[in-house]
Image: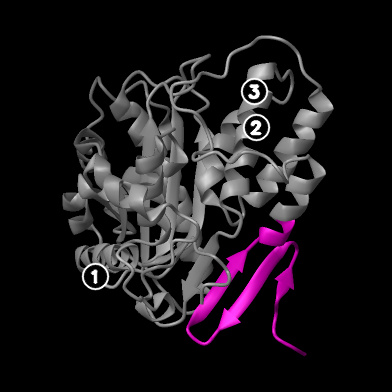
Amino acid sequence: MSELTFFIGLQVKQKEDGIFISQDKYMTQILKNFGFSDVKTASTPMETYKLLLKDTDVDEHLYRSMIGSLMYLTSSRPDIMFAVCACARFQVNPKSSHLYAVKRIFRYLKGQPKLGLWYPKDSPFDLVAYTDSDYAGASLNRKSIIGGCQFLVYRLISWQCKKQIVVANSTTEAEYIVGSNCCGQVLWIQNQLLYYGYNFMQTKIHIDIESTICINKNPIFHSKTKHIEIRHHFIRDSYEKKLIQMIKIYTDHNVTDLLIKVFDVSRLQYLIAMLLVILNIAELILLVILTTAGMNGIGVNAGDSKLMLLGNLNLTMLLNGMSVRLYTIQAVKVNAVRHKLKTAGER
């Protein structure tokens, strides 16, 4: 039997130093099916500050077909996860503003056609999670948008984006609920890995609200937490059993932002690099040097550098976004350039 190259729509490219998973053939097909093969590209999946409101009706069958095609593509493209989930909430009665937003996702994909996930062969093996919420992020009912992502150190293995089913009264409550959801996902991954002989304890869950961590550590239910549904409090039990740790992380460090909010192009590409390339400070400096050398006409072997693997990302804009956020890289561990959104043909 030959090696696996294709699996339920996922292209699998096996190399000596890792595995690259993408869906560029599927994406090319859906672009052709919906008439986006020759359109002007967009730099981001969704416009900043443009609300999805109710206006004139559109063809709901076309809208649902487009959403269904995009939902399957999120299996290897977390960069469009938030935009697709936001548009998917309006499938019952889509309007023209919603269809416009969906078309913009297709135009973004047209400009970033060959991105995927990189899973390196030789790297540490430890379970790490990040979680965050956008308080009252849903414009129509003011419910919060929650997201999370789980890594085996540098390998992105799971990511989530959804709207909370309750309206949170504060950012602390919203973050506490999303922390509970992330904890459930972490415990499930821990149980699955037990079958392979890996017993992960005290898995680090990174969250950017200090008060949420304090509530988790405090065994006393005071007036500020009594209204939170009891099913969300199992995270305390997991903490006491030392199954998880709650770690404070600065907001700019939190890579989960990519899954729950809309950003301009520089911040978007910065988050893509952080979530799916994860650069440390030394590698970032080298990336700047290599990029500058390339712009000055100096030859650079991108395959050997292992750093110029950002797919079709606009490196100039990426570096502009990074230049004002260099201090944020200190939270990322050394040698973390290993699960990448990159073009399939670069390596």
Is residue 231 in view from this perspective?
Answer: no
> Which SS class for mark 1?
loop
Q: Position of residue 200 (x, y in %)?
A: 37, 68
The verdict on residue 19 being magenta is yes
> Which SS class for mark 3?
helix
Q: Say whether marks 1 and 3 touch (CB < 8 Å).
A: no
- Chain part drawn in magenta: 1-26
The verdict on residue 261 being magenta is no
Q: Which residue is at a point 59% across and 60% down the rendered structure image? A: 114
Relative to residue 27, is residue 134 drawn left or right?
left
Is residue 263 in view from this perspective?
Answer: yes
> Which SS class for mark 2?
helix
Q: Amino acid at mark 2?
A: Val
Q: Is residue 56 above or below residue 346?
A: above
Q: Amino acid at mark 3?
A: His
**Residue situated in front as seen by the camera: 155 or 219:** 155
